[in-house]
Amino acid sequence: MLLTLYADNDEDPSSLVAIVQSAIEKNPENPNLYQGLARIYNKLKDWDNAIATIRKAVELEPENFYSNYLEGDVIIAKGNALQGEVDKQTFTSRDQSQKAKAEVDKVFAEALAPLEKAHSLNSGELVIVELLKNLTFRLREDPEMGKKYDTYLELFNQMSAK
């Protein structure tokens, strides 16, 4: 798709936002347009618009592997950006540090549902399993996430060995 080409190149894609929004106004039921716009927002590091936009694609086509994957991927990108901001901060107490970590973890946790959905749609996709393994490792202080981590780690190892 042409939008993917533009979203993936090194040029500033901000000029494409209005073009794609206009296309969406003319064809609001086309999930591919929302996917493309979400990729553009993602490249612009406009995480909230990227997430809202890809969620519209998922709403239109809930069983679409790529839309579910992209939703999780964009949420992870937002979490990574927030983690980068936290890493630059100086904390005067452990409590402050833990609170900041909890806020970032909350964002990362949002990526689990769409990635698990993507995994259910294509269980053979190693990239999804690796993302799920990494997310659940990060969130493993929660006993449920610890169990999920063990499951995804085992699955990842099995799939990697093939």
Image (tube, rainbow, N blue to C red):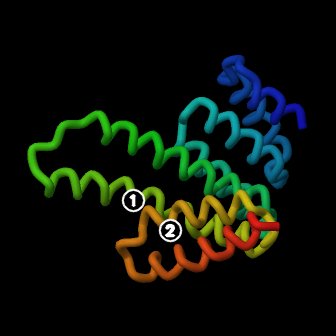
Q: Quadrant of the N terminus?
A: top right
Residue at 35% x, 72% y is 141
Label 1 secondary element: helix
Whole-percent x, y for residue 60 in the image: 77, 62
Cα distance, mark 1 to mark 2? 10 Å
Choose top left, top right, bottom left or bottom right for residue 71: bottom right
Q: Quadrant of the C terminus?
A: bottom right
Q: Find the residue positioned furthest to the left.
A: 92
Q: Nearer the viewer, residue 161 or 77?
A: 161
The amino acid type, in three-letter code, at marker 2 is Thr
Q: Nearer the viewer, residue 86 or 154?
A: 154
**Which label's residue is closer to the chain start, 1 or 2?**
1
The answer to the question of whether label 1 and label 2 lie on touching residues, with beta carbons closer than 8 A, is: no
Residue at 83% x, 30% y is 5
Residue linked to disc 1: 105
Left or right of residue 74, residue 32 in this image:
right
Choose top left, top right, bottom left or bottom right for residue 146: bottom left
**Circle nearer the viewer, 1 or 2:** 2
Choose top left, top right, bottom left or bottom right for residue 99: bottom left
Residue 136 numbered tag = 2
Q: How many numbered dots are placed on residues in this image?
A: 2
The amino acid type, in three-letter code, at marker 1 is Asp
Whole-percent x, y for residue 159 in the image: 76, 69
